[in-house]
Image (cartoon, helix red, strand yellow):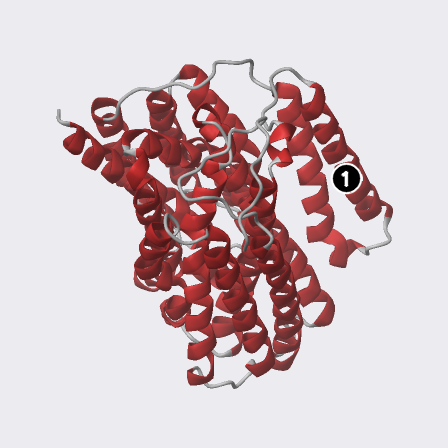
């Protein structure tokens, strides 16, 4: 097989897998009001329907990348798709919201293995000079999945039933597994020990923090359960950082964060996904619960926001090889923050949809400018052999941003407003999205602070960084 043909196959297989896994980040958003009614779910249950996937996904991403490095990226990629497919079957058959959330966690496990490997497998198959273009296309695929997640979810719920948003993954997974084993090249990274203590500390710590955030309004923020959960979670996360700094085989090498580029790019990722996921979680419910649209109608109305990455992310990726990525990322996050603030200002129970189109488009353009340049900055700040860990770290951090965005903004929504009336829902929505805008704005500040580098120059971690170019 020629190098060109192999590259085409690699891009096709990894892109379809990335699309399937990314789709499930947002595919349930427009189904949430129906699931709430069908399974008798509370707001906390609905948060876990989203967060059971994203939290498991985020925590295990680093382990997924390590498994690929140790046992073979092609092999683990195929196993990850298989696990994700089985989780989809379990979600489709779930009789209760608790069973659904457990199945979503299994999906998150599969997705955590697949996602970082799509990037490292693709990066290894593409010539270095075309990495920006390839990553731009990769970002476009991820953006396309985000774009069509709410629409696909709404169309399936309207046309068939909410369970079919999960059945759709099954035939794709059944085809991808043998195709990946046959067409992808096998590769490995540094084969070290698996960091099981780090995995346990990170998982337990983050679960404790999210548990406290999700249940804070219902149990009382000063209750022993919530204070204890948040405090224990914070202690365990701190213990994770200490452990990772001292162990010989860390799942997340703390030395990565000595690079200002790596650290600031990940801060920008965390804050961007915080604002985006939390806002879409609430807006999808606003269109159905307050304004009476169908699930499909809700998904279509979010489309001007989520569709832009399909067209703009590949261009942004190519430009990141020529223009300082920090300018592209910072501009994108600034646009996203402006758009969220705009939505918070104009949203009322009877706001005409025409008043939301412009901020949705601005948010979409901002989101599109973010994806590929961030990936380029992260991968360029580590050695080639460490790209798997760096990719896993970046994906984990931005997914955690989504987890905390849904948990925190839903908590603010429930504290200020609620489901009692359209006005109560709008009051909670506007306050929550305004907070999301402020957090994304902080992400823009972090992005503009990323050091500029000479084009084509990559700095391996552990080597002294060159003096930054003038911004």
Compared with residue 62, is residue 333 higher up or lower down, i.e. above or below? below
Q: Residues within 10 Å of mark 1 (few under 14, many from 20)?
A: some
Quarter of the figure that contains the C terminus: bottom right
Where residue 91 appears, as percent x and y from the top left, is: 44, 42
Vertical relation: 258 (above or below) 209: above
Residue at the disc numbered 1: 234
* SS state under label 1: helix
Task: Using the image as rendered, state which of residue 200 and residue 66 is in the foreground.
Answer: 66
Q: Tell which of 364 and 425 is nearer to you.
A: 364
- In the picture provided, is 36 more to the left or to the right than 159? right
Residue 262: x and y in percent read 56, 40
Residue at the image point whose x is 81% and y is 41% from the top = 231
Residue 37 visible from this viewpoint? no
Residue 264 visible? The answer is: yes
| Residue 302, image x, y percentages | 42, 68
- Is 401 left, or right, of 65 in this rendering? right
């Amino acid at each position: 097989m020629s190098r060109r043909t192999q590259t085409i196959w690699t891009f096709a297989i990894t892109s379809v897998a990335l699309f399937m896994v990314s789709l499930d980040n947002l595919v349930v958003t427009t189904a949430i009001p129906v699931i709430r009614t069908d399974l008798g779910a509370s707001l906390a249950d609905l948060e876990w329907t989203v967060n059971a996937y994203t939290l498991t996904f985020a925590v295990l991403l680093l382990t997924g990348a390590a498994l690929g490095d140790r046992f073979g990226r092609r092999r683990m990629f195929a196993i990850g798709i298989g696990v994700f497919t089985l989780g989809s079957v379990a979600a489709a058959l779930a009789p209760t919201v608790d069973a659904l959330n457990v199945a979503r966690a299994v999906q998150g496990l599969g997705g955590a293995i697949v996602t970082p490997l799509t990037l490292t497998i693709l990066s290894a198959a593409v010539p270095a000079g075309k990495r920006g273009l390839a990553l731009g296309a990769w970002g476009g695929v991820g953006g396309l999945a985000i774009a069509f997640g709410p629409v696909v979810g709404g169309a399936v719920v309207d046309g068939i039933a909410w369970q079919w948003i999960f059945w759709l993954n099954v035939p794709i997974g059944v085809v991808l597994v043998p195709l990946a084993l046959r067409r992808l090249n096998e590769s490995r990274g540094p084969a070290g020990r698996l960091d099981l203590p780090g995995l346990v500390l990170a998982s337990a710590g983050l679960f404790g923090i999210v548990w406290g955030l999700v249940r804070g309004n219902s149990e009382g923020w000063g209750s022993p359960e919530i204070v204890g959960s948040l405090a224990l979670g914070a202690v365990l996360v701190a213990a994770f950082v200490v452990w990772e700094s001292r162990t010989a085989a860390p799942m997340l090498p703390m030395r990565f964060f000595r690079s200002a580029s790596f650290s600031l790019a990940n801060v920008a990722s965390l804050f961007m996904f915080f604002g985006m996921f939390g806002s879409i979680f609430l807006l999808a419910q606003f269109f159905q619960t307050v304004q009476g649209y169908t699930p499909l109608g809700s998904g279509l109305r979010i489309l001007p926001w989520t569709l832009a990455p399909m067209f703009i992310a590949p261009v942004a990726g190519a430009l990141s090889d020529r223009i300082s990525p920090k300018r592209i990322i910072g501009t994108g996050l600034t646009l996203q923050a402006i758009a969220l603030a705009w939505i918070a200002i104009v949203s009322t129970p009877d706001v005409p949809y025409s008043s939301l189109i412009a901020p949705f488009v601005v948010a979409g353009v901002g989101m599109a400018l973010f994806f590929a340049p961030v990936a380029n900055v992260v991968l360029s700040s580590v050695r080639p052999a460490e790209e798997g860990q760096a990719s896993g770290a970046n994906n984990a951090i931005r997914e955690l941003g989504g987890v905390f965005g849904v948990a925190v903004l839903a908590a603010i929504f429930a504290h200020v407003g609620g489901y009692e009336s359209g006005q109560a829902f709008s009051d909670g929505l506007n306050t929550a999205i305004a907070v999301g805008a402020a957090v994304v704005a902080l992400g823009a500040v972090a992005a503009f602070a990323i050091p500029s580098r000479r084009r084509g120059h990559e700095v391996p971690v552990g080597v002294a960084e060159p003096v930054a170019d003038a911004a």
